[in-house]
Amino acid sequence: MMQEADDLIWKALGNPARRRLMDLLRNGPKTTSALAGEFPDLSRFAVMQHLDLLTRAGLVLVRRQGRERFNYVNPVPLREAYERWVSQQADMTAAGVLSLKRFVERGKQEGKMDESAGKVARVETEVRLNAPAERVFRALTEEINDWWAFRTRPDARIVYETRIGGRCYEEWPDGGALLYGEVVRWEPGVCVETRGPGGVGRAYHTYNRDHVSPDGDGCVYRKSLVLWGEVPPEIVKMYTEGSRYILEQMLRDYVEHGKGYTPPQR
């Protein structure tokens, strides 16, 4: 069954008109009439046939409102195919190559190199904490929900799957979720590295390394963050200031004073 579903997805994406339809739906749902208007060389019936194949592949969802038929992109089958066919190594390499490709192509179009188009930014922070290394590492991973305040929704729960390939993500009461990153290196009590998207709708990627080492009766925590792709200067500033606040305020309050996250009162 999985092979049949994959075959249908690749068949659906193998036609330029259907890929164009997916592009048109990327920024939001559109009616069938509106989509047909984007293809002056095709009949409405032909456009509907293309939409039908995308729907059977699960790539497009249809909702009817009165007489109108609204078409929505369904990203889940694409993500499932991506996770099955693209390895972690290929993903990291491809992401870097695509960033370089966009960087060069934009420079050709504009006659100059736009530094934000293919920028690589690094954020390095370090702090000494009066808590054992094992305690801090546990707080950074399996206990992150108890103190992490930078959540997109105050009622979100932060989940950290402590293993290679495990995910760190927000889980919302209504069933929604938001991915932070995926574990690509796991040394219990010492080091964890994750990679992930730069954020919703962002055209950059992140690679994060958290390292903890004993120091007397406490420990030293080092955070290294690499961002690459289309990284605006304000994003670099946000991550720099945010990383420092995480280390010196939130994490310290939690491991040294037992102060955790309290959802704001409504």
Image (tube, rainbow, N blue to C red):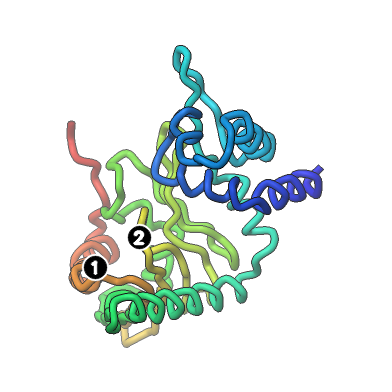
Q: Is residue 22 left or right of residue 52?
A: left
| Amino acid at circle 1 | Ile
Q: Residue at x 54, y 62 (%)?
A: 162
Answer yes or no: do the residues labelled 1 and 2 have beta carbons within 8 Å? Answer: yes
Q: Which residue is mark 2?
A: 202
Q: Residue at x 27, y 61 (%)?
A: 254
Q: Residue at x 62, y 46 (%)?
A: 77
Q: Mark 2 falls on what kind of element?
A: loop
The picture places residue 11, in percent across and down from the top left corner, at: 72, 49
Query: Gap in Å between the C-alphas at discs 1 and 2?
Result: 10 Å
Q: Which residue is mark 1?
A: 235
State the image quarter where residue 46 is shown: top right
The picture places residue 18, in percent across and down from the top left corner, at: 60, 46
| Amino acid at circle 2 | Arg
Q: Mark 1 falls on what kind of element?
A: helix
The foreground one among 55 and 155 is: 55
Of the two numbered discs 1 and 2 on the same chain, state the one appearing first in sequence: 2
